[in-house]
Image (cartoon, rainbow, N blue to C red):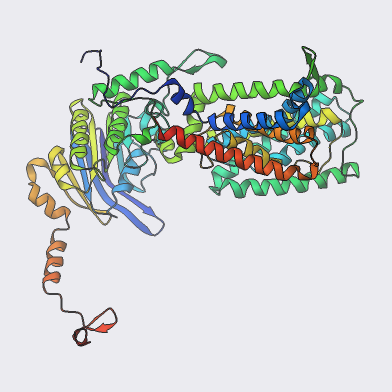
Amino acid sequence: MSTAVPADERLLTRSYLRRVLGRPELGAVVGAAAVFVFFSFVADSFLQASSLSTVLYASSTIGIMAVPVALLMIGGEFDLSTGVMVTTSALVSSMFSYQMTANVWVGVGVSLLATLAIGFFNGFMLTRTKLPSFIITLGTFLMLTGLNLGFTKLISGTVSTKTIGDMEGFESARALFASHLTIGGVDLQVTILWWLGLVALATWVLLRTRVGNWIFAVGGGADAARAVGVPVNKTKIGLYMAVAFCAWISGQHLLMSYDVVQSGEGVGNEFLYIIAAVIGGCLMTGGYGSAIGSAVGAFIFGMTSKGIVYAQWDPDWFKFFLGAMLLLATLLNAWVRKRAEATK
Amino acid sequence: MTALVKLTDVSKFYGNIRALEGVSLEVHPGEITCVLGDNGAGKSTLIKIIAGLHQHDAGSFEIEGEETRLSSPREALDRGIATVYQDLAVVPLMPVWRNFFLGSEPTKGTGPFKRLDVEAMRETTRAELLRMGIDLRDVDQPIGTLSGGERQCVAIARAVYFGAKVLVLDEPTAALGVKQSGVVLKYVAAARDAGLGVVLITHNPHHAYLVGDRFVLLKRGSMAGSHTKSQIALDELTRQMAGGSELDQLSHELERAPVPDVIGGKPVDSAGDA
């Protein structure tokens, strides 16, 4: 057979625009643009560099977790324990360092191991019991919530940890997890770099590595994946441990920014991460989505939460606006995707 | 000549259910062994044993003369047994080229820069499918957008490309139209001509007889017959497959079925009175 293949008459040329429209994150980008334009008009100070830096910071705190949560959703699973896992991670490093009067970095290291162990527990229970991830991680969520409060009260006698701000190693740990950078006169939180780095890493893994191929496959058809030799269980456990790793980063940021941790924090954040991933184009059923989309989703969250403040609206209404924004963005996302798929 | 795969008196039990008992089967290179049976005859259990998804409880399972107990589909693949399932051969949302290499992705680069060889993957997929005569519109389209026959062909081409010695096909022509079935059977024959041993599971004796060299009939978990093509004619195969004596019994019963006394809660003879 000759190498020159005549063009198939059934293959219609898809314009560059149509190709772009087929991307999973497109709906989110359009939604983000809409939110951006909206707040640019209603809030005078929204477009100032300092405001944008605050918006980016708010986005990054959600975005760091939205990245692995998006990967996990592409892999077909949920994690409801993410919000409190961040707090657990912060509590472990704080209390370990304080109680053992060890260098803060020792606590940070112990916390990494402990958090990864929680992630492993989630993944292991899921793959062993074959129960829905909703149930497994709901269990973990409740257990961690109890443990956070119980242990903190047991050890420090109050609901918050003792300050570790004067301990050895705190300054260098803070430099890594909670420092500020000034670029071009604009003050930027280091979490923004963590966030962008994680998005880039996750995108690379997802689109250009074997593991990425497996993540799409276990979410899109676990039985088919298993039948062609994909290590389905290992992939899922790995995803839960990636979530745990990012919870550790977020937890350390939480600790290093305030040097004390409130043990009841984090409840409810798990939904923000999931929402950011869904707005970013992840299908609730798995097998489809992107890491960049989750970043755009987190950005929408950041703009909404801070935009309401800059617009000087009563913050009591914040949750309502947040919910409405999210719903609108998701609807827009779905509508755009449908249009993109319908017209070739 | 040693068979590529040889099952002797293989049995499988799920708790107190006998799914398969005393089934024997041989697969030789360049031959097609057809496994025929009705729903619940144990065809799926048999495939799952050959594919490494389940282990047999009794009997022997030899691969190229060596007694084996496969622990996973991965091990079966490494031993050269590739299975193409009717419904779960592919991940629908993923592009054709990602599906083609799923589980055996080629990489380039080292260490943290180890990455998928995307260009090679795309090119190989296009070339391999073309070599089997599949004229694919776009390797980037989700495989779920292909027709059922095309999907089967991609799965078969994939198995052939990855050097399978034994190809197990689960009902490849079920749910396909006449023309599409023909296309799939053509690829099955092409795989056979390439020297592979093929196990074709089907409940369509016409398709089986077109391409098969050996026929194993399953009925309610046990073996109802084993023939080579020279030993059996299509009529006889169809008769045995369709239940043979049971079919005679059924037609007998249908002919002489007594008129029921009651239909739809009303006595039959009063139905016309109202």
- x 80%, y 41%: residue: A315
Q: Position of residue B194 (x, y in %)?
A: 20, 25
- x 61%, y 50%: residue: A135
Q: Position of residue B97 (x, y in %)?
A: 38, 25
Q: Position of residue A39 (x, y in %)?
A: 71, 31
**Can residue A2 be seen?**
yes
A339 with respect to A204 (left or right): left
Which image quadrant: the N terminus of chain B? top left
Q: Position of residue A294 (x, y in %)?
A: 61, 31
Tell me if residue B83 comes above or below residue A151 in the rendering.
above
- x 67%, y 36%: residue: A117
User: How many marks on residues?
Assistant: 0
- x 11%, y 64%: residue: B248
- Can you name the residue that lies furthest to the front here? A41
Q: Who is closer to the viewer here, A250 or A128? A: A250
Q: Who is closer to the viewer here, A230 or A85? A: A85
**Can residue A232 be seen?**
no
- Figure quadrant of residue B240: bottom left
- Figure quadrant of residue A282: top right
- Figure quadrant of residue B158: top left
